Image: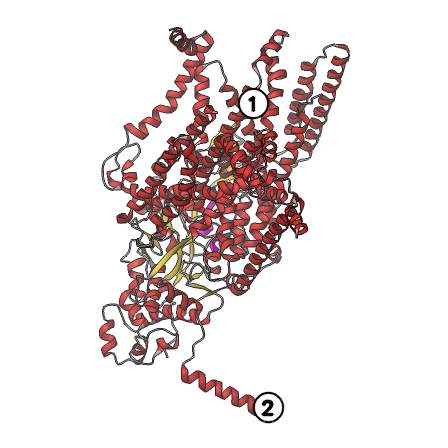
């Protein structure tokens, strides 16, 4: 008897028991749900399986990066949506980070009015649902742009109107490919040079001409390469014919509105993270670097920011993931992202809700995991090395 | 005395301290005027305030007549006019008990809070939905601000307890429980809420045995609640991690069981630390309630959009959005101030 | 021997069925009777077809059909509740049993019928897809839209129709797909698109949502046929029968000259056997479906026949001012037709 009691009271036994009970309970619940679902679906005569992916989609998409056309299958439609989601997410990430840093630093400005405006912006932006931003940028700002006939012309080659921004498109991309390879090589050279310069400084204390080399490698070579490619390529310049401009590439207003909404909204959150990060650096650090003879700019670059980044990385990761998820708001304004194309149009044509929602969720989970993994790696790299 | 002096000088210093600051201040002031003047003119000076129909909107500014005509809809949706005392009463009950808990003496807080948690949610549902002596009113007639508040409160009633459990699970030494918690949290945090609400509205009826329906609104609340629970779990985890390990070790050494130690020692401290973070998640929840309009539930924004479809009031988009957006801002701003003051108390 | 037993059994079963008026079970009908009201899925807001005013009262052609069905099934046209559905939600809501039927100007197509588990129970509106354009754009027909951008509701038949139609004619048209009709029309009104495409009837109703309706014109020649009608799930044949024949009944009533005004008099005095069967004066037709025999009498008395409903909601007596056109009875040059009540 006492043996049994001891057995029951053994913590390890209990732990195993509780976990097993939870696991079995969850599994039973899952099986129950799946059984109900399959029964209900058979009863309702709803088709299931992934065969629909190979049916012709027939849906016209106004903004595609892949080579999807209306006569391709639904799987290609899915990938076209994923590409559009990625595009708006990546560009919004970069721009929101830049704007967020700007506003975050402005909140700590020594000029009172700058500080106040940045503060007001943050308070305004953080307390309004994102959907309002999306609707505001789309129906408020973009729709206020002129009609095609009254387009705002940029040097007669690009045109801005309420149908979007029409930009010239190179007839052939070969020259640009060479230019981008050249730029990549010069960036690589610059990175190698910086490493060499730092090593040498650590070893001998001598400065290298970082600024001059940097200007040549990061500015002069890219500008020259792009200029050469631009001049050497024939361009498809948009012209006004009938209703709209023909030729060129159209950046649709839905993209611009969604991008603007994501950037202005997320920047408010990033600004707070930046401010928190900078304020988390103890004041003594800044005084100490001043005492060491560093100039204020150097202090910011070499002392404050590297330490602030450490505090900022985890919340920034969350914001980046939010941008990815929030890009689904594009569905509200007809931006053809994966939610709008796949969970909207394709779902309606096939009616296979479960398969389509599962695939859509998987897209976000996979991309989200990739972003998290990258940010964790970055976080580990910049983490404080304690000895 | 000295403080007053610094304050006075610093005012001038702040705005016009050096020539550079003066120039920047003046430029920015001009920019503010350039943006603000048209906005103020539109919302206040040139706006139409009185009238009955679209034809009374003669001013060049906003036509607030529209909002006036639709005001009760923005607040209650299609909730029957003679029954509107019910949501009012429910709101009052929630607000009063909230205030009572905040201002109660420390030793009563927990008991009051628990009592409110047991009594209020069923009371609120009863008042709003009816039955048991009250006229039954279906959720399809609910709408407007009332619905926004309802969804926010009831979704967080799911999210906060579940979030606490998940946060504890994530800290647990039991491998399987930890794994399940982590998977749950990361799944819901990884997917867009717009898809979750859609998923809940489609999937819940499918996975139930046929014949058992789940109310449309309940589905949205459950979907949002699960999603926000994952975010709440992360907020609570911050509080748990901030506690020194010694707290639990000491409690265990005193002979307290896991749940007793958690309930009396760990949670009270952890929740106090994470209260600002929890409030921030609640603000996010309030903002995310706007997404229920993808399943045709008319919350504040939804009812504003629906009212735009009325042919008698064409072109009132700006008024509808400014009014509803302003309400959201007020609610969220008040909450965020409160969360800041909590942070400062710490 | 074996054959004989089988034949005898069949015979016995046949007589039994005939004598006891055994009806196939209808879970949907039972559920409606138990809950005391009909659940009808309608469009979110399409003036003329289904539109809720600021008091939440629904009106429209599709709404009227549901009211007639409620009157036939429950004896009271007010015992119906409407669930507004977006383009995305409509099929799942019906499939998962949240509504008893959809009456939501949805087009009947082969693939919907074959793969979605849905049956279409007849046609209450012959719709044809066309475009609304600005008058100053000087567009006479859809062929003139080369190079234009067109707004459309995503997931609708119009989305695919338009894409196919322009591609077949080698016209370069940009199509922007919105999740809701209202968003599409707002975008069109704000200048995002040169045209907005939907059915003739839908356009007539939505035109009122434009800031200056008179600046726009609806192209007269439709590019497609979009017959629309009530939709039910697969299964429950008896419920499908009821949905189908209430619709037929409202059309038959117009054919036979039965209106909400003269229905009492017709029921009492008409010598026409079809009228008498329709109104339940003879034949016991309602009982064959498990309904009271005065099912169509109640529907017509309370809601009116198809023509009355049409005039009131989308016809010349309504703000939409649509001619009957294809939606006229076949005897008067239209397409409306009903099998006989025999």
- Disc tally is 2
**Residue at image point 32% right, 30% down:** B43
In the rendered image, residue A249, in percent from the top left (x then y), is placed at 56, 38
Mark pair 1, 2: CA separation: 91 Å
Please identify the quarter of the rendering in which residue B177 is found.
Answer: top right
Horizontal side, residue B72 vs residue B21: left or right: left
Is residue A68 in view? no
Residue A178 on image: x %, y %:
70, 31
Q: Say which of C30 and C185 sits in front.
A: C30
- Residue plotted at (31% across, 70% down): C254
Q: Neighbour class for label 2 at 10 Å: few (<14), some, many (≥20)?
A: few
The residue drawn where x is 75% and y is 18% is A196
Color style of the picture: secondary structure
Segment tinted magenta in the rendering: C139-158
The residue identified by callout 2 is C2
For this rendering, which residue is in front, A259 or A376?
A376
Q: Is residue C269 left or right of residue A233?
A: left
Q: Is residue B226 above or below residue A169?
A: below
Location of the C terminus of chain A by quadrant is: top right
Kindly state the secondary structure of the residue where label 1 is placed. helix
Residue wearing tag 1: A277
**Residue C27 image point, x, y percent:** 44, 68
> Viewer-proximal residue, B266 or B15?
B266
Is residue A125 depicted above or below B83 in this figure?
above
Binning the other alpha carbons within 10 Å of mark 1 as few (below 14), some (14 to 19) or many (20 upward) gives many
């Amino acid at each position: 008897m006492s043996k049994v009691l001891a057995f029951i009271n053994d913590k390890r036994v209990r732990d195993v028991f509780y976990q097993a009970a939870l696991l079995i309970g969850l599994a039973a619940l899952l099986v129950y749900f799946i059984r109900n679902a399959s029964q209900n679906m058979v009863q309702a005569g709803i088709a299931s399986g992934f065969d629909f992916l190979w049916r012709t989609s027939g849906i016209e998409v106004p903004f595609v990066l892949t080579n999807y056309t209306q006569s391709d299958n639904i799987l290609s439609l899915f990938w076209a949506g994923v590409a559009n989601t990625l595009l708006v997410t990546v560009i919004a990430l970069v721009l929101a980070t830049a704007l967020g840093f700007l506003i975050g630093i402005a909140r700590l400005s020594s000029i009172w009015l700058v500080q106040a405006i940045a503060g007001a912006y943050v308070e305004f932006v953080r307390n309004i649902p994102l959907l309002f931003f999306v609707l505001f940028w789309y129906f408020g700002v973009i729709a206020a742009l002129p009609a095609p006939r009254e387009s705002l012309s940029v040097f007669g080659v690009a045109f801005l109107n309420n149908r979007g921004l029409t930009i010239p498109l190179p007839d052939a991309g070969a020259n640009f490919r060479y230019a981008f390879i050249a730029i990549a090589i010069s960036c690589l050279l610059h990175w190698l040079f910086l490493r060499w310069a730092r090593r040498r400084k650590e070893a001998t204390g001598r400065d290298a001409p970082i600024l001059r080399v940097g200007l040549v490698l990061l500015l002069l070579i890219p500008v020259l390469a792009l200029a050469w490619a631009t001049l050497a390529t024939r361009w498809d310049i948009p012209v006004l014919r009938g209703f709209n401009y023909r030729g060129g590439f159209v950046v649709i207003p839905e993209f611009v509105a969604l991008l603007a909404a994501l950037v202005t909204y997320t920047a408010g959150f990033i600004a707070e993270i930046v401010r928190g990060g900078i304020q988390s650096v103890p004041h003594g650090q800044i005084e100490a670097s001043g005492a060491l003879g560093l100039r204020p700019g150097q202090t910011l670059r070499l002392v404050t920011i590297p330490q602030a980044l450490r505090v900022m990385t985890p919340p920034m990761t969350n914001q980046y993931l939010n941008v990815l998820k929030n890009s689904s708001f594009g569905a509200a304004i007809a931006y053809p992202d994966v939610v709008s194309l796949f969970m909207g149009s394709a779902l309606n044509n096939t009616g296979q809700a479960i398969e389509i929602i599962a695939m859509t969720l998987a897209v976000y989970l996979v991309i989200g995991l990739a972003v998290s993994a990258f940010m964790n790696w970055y976080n580990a790299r910049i983490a404080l090395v304690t000895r | 005395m000295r403080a007053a002096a610094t304050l006075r000088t610093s005012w001038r210093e702040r705005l016009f301290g050096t020539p550079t600051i003066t120039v920047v201040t003046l430029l920015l002031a001009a920019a503010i005027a350039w943006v603000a003047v048209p906005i103020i003119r539109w919302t206040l000076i040139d706006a139409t305030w009185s009238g009955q129909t679209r034809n009374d909107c003669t001013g060049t500014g906003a036509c607030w007549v529209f909002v006036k005509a639709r005001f009760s809809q923005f607040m209650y949706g299609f909730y029957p006019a003679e029954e509107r005392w019910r949501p009012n009463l429910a709101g009052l009950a929630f607000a009063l008990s909230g205030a009572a808990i905040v201002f109660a003496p420390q030793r009563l807080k927990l008991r009051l809070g628990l009592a409110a948690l047991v009594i209020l949610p069923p009371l609120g549902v009863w008042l709003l939905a009816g039955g048991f002596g009250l006229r039954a009113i279906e959720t399809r007639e609910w709408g407007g601000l009332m619905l926004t508040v309802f969804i926010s409160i009831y979704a967080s009633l799911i999210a906060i307890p579940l979030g606490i459990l998940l946060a504890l699970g994530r800290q647990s030494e039991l491998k399987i429980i930890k794994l399940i918690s982590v998977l749950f949290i990361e799944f819901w945090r990884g997917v867009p809420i717009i898809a979750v609400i859609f998923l809940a509205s489609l999937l819940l009826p499918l996975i139930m045995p046929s014949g058992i329906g789940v109310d449309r609104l309940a589905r949205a609340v459950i979907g949002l609640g699960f999603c926000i629970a994952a975010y709440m779990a992360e907020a609570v985890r911050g509080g748990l991690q901030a506690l020194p390990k010694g707290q639990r070790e000491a409690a265990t050494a005193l002979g307290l069981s896991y749940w007793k130690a958690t309930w009396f020692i760990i949670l009270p401290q952890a929740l106090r630390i994470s209260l600002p973070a929890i409030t921030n998640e609640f603000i996010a929840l309030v903002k995310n309630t706007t997404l229920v309009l993808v399943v045709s539930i008319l919350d504040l924004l939804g009812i504003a959009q629906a009212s735009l479809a009325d042919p008698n009031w064409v072109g009132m988009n700006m008024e509808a959005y400014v009014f509803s957006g302003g309400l959201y801002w007020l609610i969220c701003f008040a909450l965020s101030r409160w969360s800041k003051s909590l942070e400062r108390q710490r | 021997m074996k054959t004989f037993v089988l034949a005898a059994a069949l015979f016995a079963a046949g007589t039994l069925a005939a004598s006891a008026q055994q009806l196939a079970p209808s879970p949907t009908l039972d559920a409606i009777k138990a809950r005391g009201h009909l659940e009808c899925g309608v469009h979110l807001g399409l003036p003329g077809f289904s539109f809720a005013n600021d008091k939440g009262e629904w009106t429209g052609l599709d709404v009227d059909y549901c009211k007639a069905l409620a009157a036939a099934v429950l004896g009271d046209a007010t015992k119906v509740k409407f669930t507004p559905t977006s383009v995305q939600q409509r099929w799942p809501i019906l499939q998962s049993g949240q509504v008893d039927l959809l009456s939501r100007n949805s087009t009947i197509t082969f693939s919907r019928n074959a793969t979605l588990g849905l049956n279409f129970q007849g046609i209450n509106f012959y719709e044809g897809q066309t475009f609304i354009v600005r008058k100053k754009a000087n567009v006479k027909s859809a062929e003139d839209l080369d190079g234009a951008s067109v707004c459309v509701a995503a997931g609708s038949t119009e989305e695919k129709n338009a894409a196919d139609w322009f591609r077949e004619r080698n016209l370069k048209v940009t199509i922007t797909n919105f999740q809701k009709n209202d968003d599409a029309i707002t975008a069109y009104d704000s200048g995002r698109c040169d045209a907005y495409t939907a059915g003739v009837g839908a356009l007539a109703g939505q035109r009122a949502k434009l800031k200056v309706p008179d600046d726009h014109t609806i192209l007269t020649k439709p590019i497609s046929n979009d017959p629309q009608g009530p939709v039910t799930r697969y299964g429950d044949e008896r419920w499908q029968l009821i949905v189908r024949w209430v619709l037929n009944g409202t059309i038959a009533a117009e054919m036979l000259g039965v209106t909400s005004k003269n229905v009492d008099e017709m029921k009492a005095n008409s010598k026409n056997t079809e009228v008498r069967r329709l109104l339940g004066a003879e034949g016991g037709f309602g009982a064959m479906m498990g309904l009271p025999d005065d099912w169509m009498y109640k529907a017509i008395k309370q809601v009116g026949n198809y023509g009355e409903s049409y005039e009131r909601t989308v016809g010349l007596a309504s703000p939409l001012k649509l001619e009957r056109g294809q939606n006229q009875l076949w005897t008067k040059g239209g397409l409306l037709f009903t099998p006989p009540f025999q």
